[in-house]
Amino acid sequence: MGAKVSRTDFEWSPTEEPHATRRKEILEKHPEIKKLYGPDKNFKWIVVITTILQLGSLYLIQDLKWPTVMILAYCFGGVVNHSLMLAIHEIAHNMGFGPKYPMYNKLLGMFANLPIGLPFSVTFKYYHLEHHRYQGDEKLDTDIPTYVEAKLFNSTFGKFVWVLLQPFFYALRPMFVYPKNPTALEIISVAIQLAFNYWVYLYLGTKVITYMLAGSLMAMGLHPVAGHFISEHYMFHKGFETYSYYGPLNFITFNVGYHNEHHDFPFVPGSKLPQVKKIAPEFYDNLPQHHSWTSVLYDFIMDPNIGPYARIKRKHKGLKF
């Protein structure tokens, strides 16, 4: 478990991120993909119903024994919360009500955030859209681990710990790499979430608030659904920086596994990303891909050729306006 990773630095690329170029090539050959742009009319209702059901389930937790609470948090509550996190990812791309109604999208994201317990829905959008536009940028793409992470967690055991702690790195990394002044809406959203958390603790008890928070944190760490964090951009094959996952967990994660397709066409909702692949298979079928997020986690931890350094980075060139 102490084996060191073989890489000692990130993979530096002199080229621009690949998705804008591929999008142009695909649209020249398959312009009909533009018909898929825009929100799925059913998506917002799926989010609302899932959130209400998850909030309702909290009342069933308060009288259970602690071992049962923790097992349910890992196997059920955390999975639903992770699904809602990926709903918030969709909402960050205006897939709730479309780009003409930004406040409606933000309110939907704040509502979906409630059972998750960790206030992030508003802030996430500000960083995530720059991850798309400036993929690999050493400053602007906060999805990439820092040198401190890569150097500290550079063994098999270190990678195991790093995977367990993934939610904390995702939450704290932007504050150190690319801090931004909070907006008024961010402050309001955090206040609403903390007030809701306090209400849950006050009226439903310690077990329920633990179920919420522990479930969210566990499902972002060493958990099958969290495999997408690593499968999406860690370099399992030299020179390839984005990977799609074509497996059954796409069903509960709004097709986030179709990640090449998503980066190529961020204006296509998750429900229609399989259609992108079907329309343009010649652009996707021969790319390296994953079929198991559990295998991704295992390979990431055990393979000395993969680790936090296994990311393609680009020198920061400044924001484009």
Image (cartoon, rainbow, N blue to C red):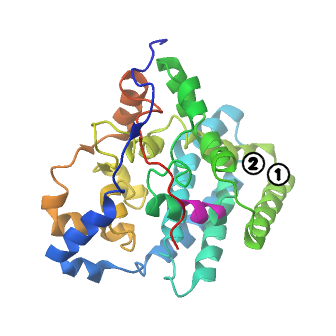
The residue under label 2 is which amino acid type?
Answer: Ile
The residue shown at (16%, 53%) is 285
- In the image, the segment drawn in magenta is 123-128
Label of residue 201 in the image: 1
Given residues 224 and 230, the one toward you in this image is: 230
Residue at the limit of the structure toward the bottom, as seen here = 100
Label 1: element kind: helix
Q: Residue at x 55, y 38 (%)?
A: 221
Three-letter code, disc 1: Tyr
Q: Is residue 227 left or right of residue 276?
A: right
Which residue is the extreme one toward the top?
2
Task: Please name whichever residue, 158 or 290, is drawn nearer the observer in this view of the structure.
Answer: 158
Check contact, mark 1 vs mark 2: CB within 8 A. yes
- Please tell me how crowded label 2 is: few (under 14), some (14-19), or many (20+) other residues with Cα within 10 Å: many
Magenta stretch: helix, strand or loop mostly: helix
Reading the image, the residue beneath label 2 is: 209
**Residue 313 x %, y %:** 43, 45
Visible residue check, residue 244 = yes
